[in-house]
Image (cartoon, helix red, strand yellow):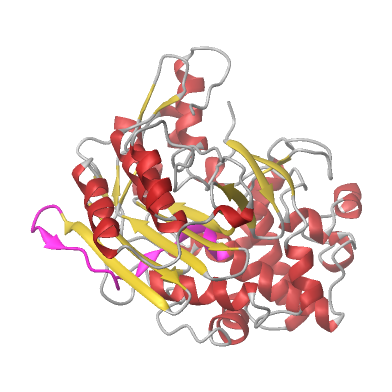
Amino acid sequence: MKMRVSGKSTSRRLAVAAVTLGALLTATAAPAHARDGGGLDRQALRQALDAVHEAGMYGIYSQVRDGSQTWQGASGVADVATNRPVRPDMVHRVGSITKTFTSVALLQQVARGAVELDAPIGRYLPDVVPGERGEKITVRMLLNHTSHIADYVGPAFPSLLVGSPQSLDDNRFRVFTRAELVRLGLDAAPTGEPGALPGVYSNTNYLIAGLLLEKVTGTGAEEYITRNVIRKAGLRHTSFPRTPHIPGPHSKAYESLYGWIDPPRDYSVYSPTWATTAGSIVSTMDDLNRFYRALLRGELIGAAELAEMKRTVPVLAGGVLDYGLGLYYFDLPCGRFWGHSGGVFGMATESMTSEDGTRQLSMGVNRTKYQTLDENGGIVLHPIDYASGAYFLLAACGESAGTQARTARPTYVPFAVDRVTVKR
């Protein structure tokens, strides 16, 4: 599937490049009992992972779980200059998967009675979202992206509008505050009326959620999430980085910006303050699987709060997502999978778990926006998209689905959700 926008002007095509931080996706509905993925075909998984590298991805690493069985693998290089190989246990910037962690933390406060999901955000943060907007926008609207507050990332990195990484380079070590980034989003034109459907994906929502968390707990948002979500889930290699560097063994992160950066440039080192509670967590594929399994089994929040997370609405994020509260689902050929994807400059991640928590897969890559755009500004799928889609379906659903994916247009293209709304 290709994303298209009206018009053929250069500014519109470049805006699409800024809007899309990953490949596009569609999903094919199927009954949950269709899964044939019982057990793990380790040879097939290895071959499919290698195929993603052979299609042009520098490096990819993944872990797949089926009940008590676990397989993990890696293919390619972590550094194109030295040919240092990638490893399955590498620490990785997981981008918007951070939103699930932030949502879980706030839902813990909902369970305590400190926050009401359908209360106006102005009740808690009148100085952040003042006036009529603060009265109309609820906490739920922030978490499910129906607030229609614009995304701050475009205004924070304006050179994306002209196909240049200059503002990324200029701001690489800049220390942003959540408040100033939220103000960029609030000052931009709203994407609609609060609560209107479909919603529009915006990182600003989750920075406001971080400010709300700090207000009701009296603790820094990252500190609270670390103590009450990351440690509660038993995650040993997941954190909010305190410096521009990724803690632990990691890959470099190569950004192509749809061909405007050639050769791709390493963006593995930067100040994490531009993403914080919307997207700055680092983790491993093993930790991500542990996290989503614990979440879906009710070990991090109660049944009522998990049910709220799973109440979905349509949200525009390149395609249309069935988005809940920091969590969304896709109906794959073998059933429903819940999770999130994430992307930052140079790194993308996908983590999905079957409805019953039995089948899981997490995968990370170290090159992003490797596709090109057509004359209408639509993304032209790359062989990497076909190969990664085939691997994903094999890992989720078993050999028959993986074989079908290798011979047809992908029904699922991973690494799709990190959208930036920018001025056109």
Question: Is 12 or 215 nearer to us in this picture?
Answer: 12
Whole-percent x, y for residue 407 in the image? 34, 34
Q: Is residue 134 left or right of residue 53?
A: right
As for residue 291 lying within the magenta part, the answer is no
Corner quadrant of residue 166: top left
Measured along the vertical axis of the image, is residue 304 above or below residue 404?
below
Residue at the far left: name it. 82
Q: Residue at x 28, y 64 (%)?
A: 42
Q: Residue at x 82, y 80 (%)?
A: 111
Measured along the vertical axis of the image, is residue 7 above or below residue 172?
above
Corner quadrant of residue 319: top right
Give the quadrant of the C terminus: top right
Q: Which residues are magenta?
A: 80-98
Q: Residue at x 41, y 31 (%)?
A: 409
As for residue 96 lying within the magenta part, the answer is yes
Camera sees residue 336: no
Tell how many labels. Answer: 0
Q: Is residue 46 left or right of residue 210?
A: left
Measured along the vertical axis of the image, is residue 280 above or below residue 6?
below
Whole-percent x, y for residue 170 in the image? 37, 48
